[in-house]
Amino acid sequence: MIRVGINGYGTIGRRVANAVQLQRDMKVVGIVKTRPDYVARVASSRFSIFVPDESYLKAFDDAGIKVKGVLSDLIRMSDVVVDATPEGQGKKNTPMYRTAGVKAVFQGGEEAGVADVSFNAYSCFDSAVGKSSARVVSCNTTGLARSLHALHSEFGVEHVDGTIIRRATDPNDHKKGPINALEPSLKIPSHHAPDLRTVLPVDIDTVAIKAPTTLMHIHVLNVTLKKEVQQSDVISAFSSRRRIMLVDGKDGVSSTAQVMDLARELGRDRSDMYELVIWRDAVRVSGRRVSYIQAVHQESDVVPENVDAIRALMGSMERDASIDATDSSLNIGGMKIYG
Amino acid sequence: MIRVGINGYGTIGRRVANAVQLQRDMKVVGIVKTRPDYVARVASSRFSIFVPDESYLKAFDDAGIKVKGVLSDLIRMSDVVVDATPEGQGKKNTPMYRTAGVKAVFQGGEEAGVADVSFNAYSCFDSAVGKSSARVVSCNTTGLARSLHALHSEFGVEHVDGTIIRRATDPNDHKKGPINALEPSLKIPSHHAPDLRTVLPVDIDTVAIKAPTTLMHIHVLNVTLKKEVQQSDVISAFSSRRRIMLVDGKDGVSSTAQVMDLARELGRDRSDMYELVIWRDAVRVSGRRVSYIQAVHQESDVVPENVDAIRALMGSMERDASIDATDSSLNIGGMKIYG
Amino acid sequence: MIRVGINGYGTIGRRVANAVQLQRDMKVVGIVKTRPDYVARVASSRFSIFVPDESYLKAFDDAGIKVKGVLSDLIRMSDVVVDATPEGQGKKNTPMYRTAGVKAVFQGGEEAGVADVSFNAYSCFDSAVGKSSARVVSCNTTGLARSLHALHSEFGVEHVDGTIIRRATDPNDHKKGPINALEPSLKIPSHHAPDLRTVLPVDIDTVAIKAPTTLMHIHVLNVTLKKEVQQSDVISAFSSRRRIMLVDGKDGVSSTAQVMDLARELGRDRSDMYELVIWRDAVRVSGRRVSYIQAVHQESDVVPENVDAIRALMGSMERDASIDATDSSLNIGGMKIYG
Amino acid sequence: MIRVGINGYGTIGRRVANAVQLQRDMKVVGIVKTRPDYVARVASSRFSIFVPDESYLKAFDDAGIKVKGVLSDLIRMSDVVVDATPEGQGKKNTPMYRTAGVKAVFQGGEEAGVADVSFNAYSCFDSAVGKSSARVVSCNTTGLARSLHALHSEFGVEHVDGTIIRRATDPNDHKKGPINALEPSLKIPSHHAPDLRTVLPVDIDTVAIKAPTTLMHIHVLNVTLKKEVQQSDVISAFSSRRRIMLVDGKDGVSSTAQVMDLARELGRDRSDMYELVIWRDAVRVSGRRVSYIQAVHQESDVVPENVDAIRALMGSMERDASIDATDSSLNIGGMKIYG
């Protein structure tokens, strides 16, 4: 039984906690919260609550939320800590994990140097086996890795131009905009291109535009392969991966609104869509050129990757067995309704 | 075991189907879908699928979705039909139900005359007992009935001025706007005021403004009571009802974004919030004047009411027992985290 | 010729500068900008540019924008300074104006105590005559003052309940949200009620809800008058004021989108709508109760008030003559197309 | 003096009417409106109003808007008709224009076959000279033609991959969505690629995604040139065209919100941005590969093209003289503030 501590219980941390709890070979030792808000209140009925240090105790006590200990206690009780703290905090936490000799999984908001390796289950599970730490790449990079690894391993990828239309903020935030504008990232290529190369060695350029929506990111990908293919080859490569879900406009999936509605219909925890979603009707192939449109659920696509990263670090399971176990527990591919 | 047919599997129908299935004294005989889309595909793994008539069979067959029969078959197999068809269709369906001698529950999109009585579990359960049909009032009217019934039964309501800021469309729709405007309903009072009086006899005026959001409606209510009260009296009246959830800004619930996030944390089916949500910090009392702000989850607040309406029509349970059974099955009030 | 300095050239400052320049009895001596951005670049072709102090000179020089002097220079050259600096900065600037003996007009973001009097042209022009400083109340309060002064002076206002649906940010901002939520102000009454009483002595409560739109605020007002009236009386009271524009749904003005489009059609500077807009079809009267819906263009409704405030402080014109001059220069009421 | 009739006074028609009125060699004979709404009311103070046929007269009469005649009258009085009727209506109008022997300018909503030639002033002015009719390509295609013609004529374009993030609807509409979703066009390539080839012979693929904003479209373009270039070459090619405006993030132009704000600052009619806007800081060049981000103001970028199309059809001015005259009248490039 791998004992997992969850440091940070925001958008990613809470979802990873739930997923870890569903694994037969893992259990959540506790979660770290910094604020005694409604999220902490609900969490306290499922998990032991820890706080970063003693200075946080009074606020939780005032709010009537029971605290089991502080972060250093949690680290001592854990085999692996999943660090899901805000961007940049992970790096500050590394000495603590190293000193305690606990393995650590970081998130994609951290720079690559934070961990021994960057991680994506399909493209580089083995490189993390037995390491002390791994960084699960960000939601967008995970999405890129999934579809491009499928293409790269089957056909070879020569070059990719990607346009990323980013959701501006998450559904549970009300402070960030824009309300009515499109905001390009003026740094070209955007950070996604170099980030992808930490887990998949392909030649890629990316441009990112922020749009006023909260649901999902959309990627438009123009890929030049190393050999000519047919549309059916590409669709077949995608559909062979459980963490890619093919959808169709003719099934009523016209926008990210319906993709998220589909997730609700599937009865997922927090109505999440763990899979990368690709529109089958929009896969276009012309010789070596492939273009397609994919949607990334920023809140949850990295969740199964975090679970696999834990197993990779522990060296407790092979890649395919881990992916099978994770997907089975989260019902990924369990209800095969498309393609 | 009450046999329930669900005619219409849109926003409301699919949620009522799920809720009915969770009752010990009911079962879903089948659901009627008109389009073989992703919703039908997922539903087919849980429920028997029916179509309105034979003309729909081919489309479902082409889509590979198995159909068990047509609407008239479903009616024959049901004790009660929950009609959740699009606005106005319910009225057209009434002769069919009447001829078949099946009881029917309609939704608030229909006019009051569609059924023997209009229905809200708190305010008028008994008037529906043994009737042939009932109309569960709309999401907004249900929200108004819940809080105003609490005030009316405790203190007497003399007059209400309500401003309803409406979500413009549901999360799974991408066609309707506005994207960046506020649209007043120029008919004053809006239809909500007369609709409320079908289930609660209070003097009320309402104005409605449509806003570019999909999550929830918000109501601002200015109520004149028949006697002077304290703030604590009002909060106490609200907190005595399980279908009202009190939340606090200091718990981090600052907007409808966090209310819906709370629903996700509570693990609700489809991340729904069945309760009417009232901000405790914003309840203001001055003599006989009370003002407060409430949020209505348009997709789901009528779901428990539909379940109770079924029992009322069947005469199979008393009001309080039915409300208890429904709330228990849907975990309403089961995790008492506020107030 | 009144010499006017504009300290702050953001949303309000730039509009007041334009309006002042259009007056026959005023001229803009210069405007103060803090950043050498695109706004400064365009402004430099129309106005002399000043900066707060010498530390800003290099940045403007680097950007190639010519600077004429610093704030203290501008103050020395001005009879009146319009302070349109960010909220709270006005208060810090007061000693500077007082020491220099220059009159000052502040904006509604400042607290009432910042100036000798609070100002609205209709309701309290005379109280500012000859004073050293005046605060033009905020966009929302100005809107409330316009319609409620019309009612109060004609019929007497006993009580007002107002719900303010606020645009979340201005059209030229892309950072603030919410993108998809409604956010109530949990402080009840909101600050608008006490603020209105600084310019109009009526009993009022207000509740404010923030909505994801950039165009305009909407107010829903429930007013109890001191005597019974007819709908035509109320419409007549509103239409007698040039700074109130009556619109009709049947003319195609269904939402704030069309109100702003109308402003564009009218050829206004920056497509502004200086008038308070009231939907004629939605004015409802029942005995002493009046309810109506009004829309406030937050970027510009205070512009004519600033112009009048300058004249009031200077004692250079009577109330009605000033309002006439201002309105004529800005084409307010110049094209009488409604009511 | 070219006599111009404007058939259709929606988003494009009203802007073309204004622009035509500003030309020294043209005058607006009249405009055709179908509804007596607020737009018609304002228009009636500037232009003679015509209606499609006699059946419309009563509605305008009831609304108190004076009508000068019907469409056939207007056609008889015109040398050229600018047809800005809703998509698809232009085609139905062609027999009328042909029979009357009047020249006609159509809009990009019509299919290419509607007119003798498709039109963009930079790329194919001469092909329209003396023809009976021309179709000004759509806002997006016009934007593509402007920047790609600059690159193609200077360096030769081998291939283009374009991603078009479309504003979902115009600012004066409140009915269309999405409110909170991204909607891909599942037809790949989108119609923009073949449409561009009607005015510029380049090899291009395009994908379009609809986003919940009203202000502008954004295009991300990945271009392979026929020869290697430097970034400065590309910027120089763009800045040599008056109808391209280069902006910089460091000037505060971070999103489409500030681009439209800049248009307001420039004092444009209806706050329009006639120029194609390209972010100078985001032009990236690597060998023969160029990528850049451009923003298109869908309401107005075709306005100068319509003016030029009129002159081309009439054969009354050479290409460069016409572009100079149009740009001068609309103040395009008149205030050179960037690049």
Image: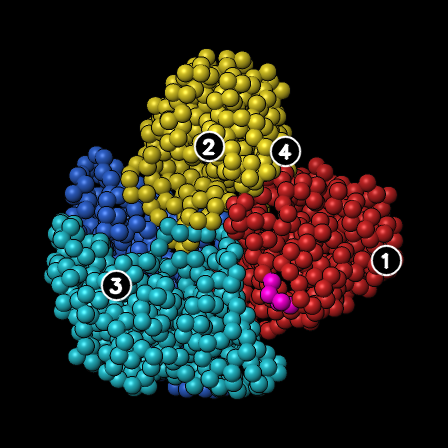
Chain colours: A red, B yellow, C blue, D cyan
* Pick the front one: C25 or C220: C220
Q: Chain of mark 1?
A: A
Q: Chain of mark 3?
A: D
Look at mark 2 in the image and give the residue it sits on. Answer: B55
At 48% from the left and 29% from the top, the residue drawn is B54
Q: How many marks?
A: 4
Around disc 2, counting alpha carbons within 10 Å, would you say few (fewer than 14), some (14 to 19), or many (20 or more)? few
Q: At which x and y percent is residue B289?
A: 38, 34
Q: At which x and y percent is residue B299?
A: 50, 37
* Pick the front one: C187 or B3: B3
Q: Chain of mark 4?
A: B
User: In the image, what residue type sits under mark 1?
Assistant: Val
Q: At which x and y percent is residue B268?
A: 61, 36
- Please state, as top left, top right, bottom left or bottom right, where the N terminus of chain A lies in the image: top right
Query: Mark 4 to mark 3: distance in Å?
Result: 54 Å
Q: Main secondary structure of the magenta part?
A: strand
Q: Secondary structure at mark 3?
A: helix
User: In the image, what residue type sits under mark 2?
Assistant: Ser
Asked if labels 4 and 1 touch by Cβ distance under 8 angstroms, the answer is no
Query: Mark 2 to mark 1: distance in Å?
Result: 57 Å
Mark with earlier residue (4, 2): 4
| Tag in front: 2 or 1 | 2
Same chain for marks 2 and 3? Answer: no
Query: Mark 1 to mark 3: distance in Å?
Result: 71 Å
Look at mark 1 in the image and give the residue it sits on. Answer: A129
- Magenta span: A285-289
